[in-house]
């Protein structure tokens, strides 16, 4: 019984430290790994078969942009809560919830809700 309690404590601590030490969001399946910073900056898009990272290491890019009155705004904040990506767009007051649907060979992102007025999702 003591060993079981120790194992449970270790599992809880490992989950706690894993979630506290990373500031990145990882979307992955059997074929690719997509890593995004909580600021919305794309960090990696790796083909798991070849190990090739297809993101340009020199040019920063964001995972989402919106248009308001023909002005482009980048995502400023990103979090993953369950299967929902929560995106914030700074001073615009716009927030977007995106449902993440995972499958073995793909990940589908579906806009679940938008708060605020936008022209388009870029």
Image: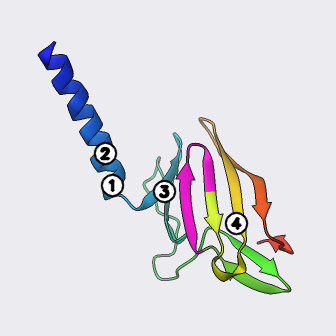
Left or right, 60 with reference to 18: right
Residue at the disc numbered 2: 16
Residue at the disc numbered 1: 20
- Along the polypeptide, which appears first: circle 4 or circle 1? 1
Callout 2 touching callout 3 (CB < 8 Å): no
**Image location (x, y in percent) of residue 120:** 84, 72
Secondary structure beneath label 1 = helix
> Which one is in front, 58 or 108?
108
Secondary structure beneath label 4 = strand
Q: Residue at x 52, y 82 (%)?
A: 59
> Which one is in front, 46 or 22?
22
- Along the polypeptide, which appears first: circle 2 or circle 3? 2
Residue at the disc numbered 3: 25
The magenta-colored residue range is 76-85
Secondary structure beneath label 3 = strand
Which labelled disc corresponds to residue 61?
none
Residue 56 in magenta? no
- Along the polypeptide, which appears first: circle 3 or circle 1? 1
Quarter of the figure with the C terminus: bottom right
Callout 2 touching callout 1 (CB < 8 Å): yes
**Image location (x, y in percent) of residue 85:** 61, 54
Does residue 112 appear in the picture of this structure? yes
Q: Residue at x 56, y 69 (%)?
A: 77
Callout 4 touching callout 2 (CB < 8 Å): no
């Amino acid at each position: 019984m003591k060993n079981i309690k120790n194992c449970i404590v270790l599992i809880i601590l490992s989950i706690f430290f894993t979630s506290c030490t990373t500031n990145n969001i990882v979307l992955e399946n059997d074929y690719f790994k997509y890593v995004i910073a909580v600021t919305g900056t794309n960090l990696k898009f790796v083909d798991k078969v070849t190990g090739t990272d297809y993101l340009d290491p020199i040019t920063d890019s964001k995972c989402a942009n919106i248009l308001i009155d023909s002005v482009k705004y980048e995502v400023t904040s990103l979090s993953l809560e369950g299967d929902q990506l929560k995106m914030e767009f700074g001073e615009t007051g716009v927030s977007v919830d995106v449902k993440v649907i995972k499958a073995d060979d793909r990940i589908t992102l579906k806009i679940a809700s938008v708060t605020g007025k936008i022209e388009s999702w870029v």
